Amino acid sequence: KAGVTQTPRYLIKTRGQQVTLSCSPISGHRSVSWYQQTPGQGLQFLFEYFSETQRNKGNFPGRFSGRQFSNSRSEMNVSTLELGDSALYLCASSLDWAGNTGELFFGEGSRLTVL
Amino acid sequence: TQLLEQSPQFLSIQEGENLTVYCNSSSVFSSLQWYRQEPGEGPVLLVTVVTGGEVKKLKRLTFQFGDARKDSSLHITAAQPGDTGLYLCAGEGGFYNQGGKLIFGQGTELSVKP
């Protein structure tokens, strides 16, 4: 069973640019969540999608957005990049949301560096 | 605002030693999960505790959920170099949950030297 796949694994951008990250969940998983991981803040929840609808959202500015497609694949976009956006962006899929104490399966992450 | 506090943040020990990692909050959680993350990889779930006072064992790892479901601990007996990694606790259903599925602690970076 293939795991969660995130692309690209590494990318470098400059301030003001925008970036799109992709996540393919485990087959059959309908919930996809995105987290930002930095040394100072740890894992911070960005948003969660279920059946193409954003079901939960964290406390990030509107520059951070996402979407989910009918095949459950998800993308997140960050516009007008800032130096502080440098982080590891993790995608996690689950059969359903963690309210059922379900397990989150994480991808290896996309490491974004903003210069 | 970080609602789950883990301690210690860094821990470097010798092989064979015991250690305990703590995860504390002022919020009540319906469940708490522990993950381990190795360099270059995403976190992997170790255990989920649901009931106050619950104790779960996974080989040399013992997890406990506090009676009030506000705190948890992870105890490792006779640590091995293979235990090295970042240990994360994550709570769901807390009162101050701001719409996210899981609130993560900042993690405990464990290094076990041979």
Image (cartoon, rainbow, N blue to C red):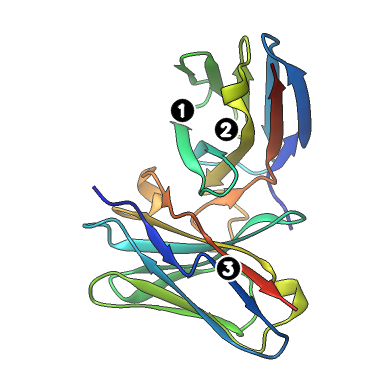
Q: Amino acid at mark 1?
A: Thr
Q: Which is in the foreground here, disc 3 or disc 2?
A: 3
Circle 1 residues within 10 Å: few <14, some 14–19, many ≥20: some
Which of the 4 image quarters holds residue A10?
A: bottom right
Q: Which is in the foreground here, disc 3 or disc 1?
A: 3
Letter of the chain that mark 3 sits on in the rendering: A
Q: Are marks 3 and 2 on the same chain?
A: no
Q: Which residue is mark 1?
A: B51
Kindly check if marks 1 and 2 are in contact, taking CB atoms under 8 A apart as contact.
Answer: no
Q: How many marks?
A: 3
Answer yes or no: is residue B26 visible.
no
Q: Which residue is mark 3?
A: A58
How far from the left and from the top, in percent, is residue B87?
62, 36
| Residue at the image position 76 percent from the left and 19 percent from the top | B13
Which of the 4 image quarters holds residue A38?
A: bottom right
Answer yes or no: is residue A115 visible.
yes
- SS at mark 2? loop
How far apart marks 3 and 1 lie (CA) works out to: 27 Å
Letter of the chain that mark 1 sits on in the rendering: B
Q: Which residue is mark 2?
A: B69
